[in-house]
Amino acid sequence: MRINERKTKKLWDSLPPRYLMDVQARDFPHRGLRYKSATLSLFHHWEGSSATDEHLTVPDGAGNEYTWSQIEETFTREEMLLILDYFIKYDPTCEIMIKKATPPKNKGAGIGAMAVGGNTDFYMFDKDDRWNLPFGVWGYFDVGENTALSEVR
């Protein structure tokens, strides 16, 4: 199902801003190796979470998974601040990049819709015992161009 992009933009612009978040993690483990760094693009993950679809701003006619995946990678200001607090507390060496999100497009897909395997995967922050936020967050990463520093011990 296609969305009306003009109507969606008007709705999106009338609401409080949403944000995209990337985390540059240091000393990152993946598949038995340790990498100097990895960039994780964050997105909402609902399974096993107390969050519901009402936390998202749904554009008129948004019925396809690619549209939803674009919305899921955005965070409200309140969610962004909770995520920042989590990383400040549990991974103070990471670098966090934040930018204002744009409305979803018909010819787009969010990072939650990406295929994973090999050098790419999802890191499940909400599976960490320290995770205490009221919504789930995962991060997509690709260590393909990074050089492994050592084996994980």
Image: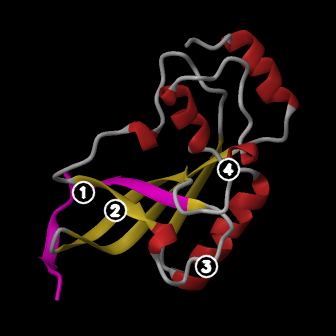
Question: Which labelled disc corresponds to residue 75?
Answer: 4
Q: Is the C-beta separation of discs 1 and 2 under 8 Å? A: yes
Question: Which labelled disc corresponds to residue 123?
Answer: none
Q: Residues within 10 Å of mark 2 (few under 14, many from 20)?
A: many
* Residue where numbered disc 1 is placed: 143
Q: CA distance from mark 2 to mark 4?
A: 21 Å
Q: Is the C-beta separation of discs 1 and 3 under 8 Å? A: no
Query: Which quarter of the rendered picture does the N terminus lie within?
Result: top right
Which residue is at 48% across, 16% downward? Answer: 107
Percent x, y for residue 3? 63, 14
Q: Residues within 10 Å of mark 1 (few under 14, many from 20)?
A: many
64 relative position to 16: left or right: left
Which residue is at 74% across, 20% downward? Answer: 9
Label 4, secondary structure: give it. loop
Relative to the observer, which residue lies in front, 22 or 68?
Answer: 68
Where does the magenta region start and end?
A: 137-153
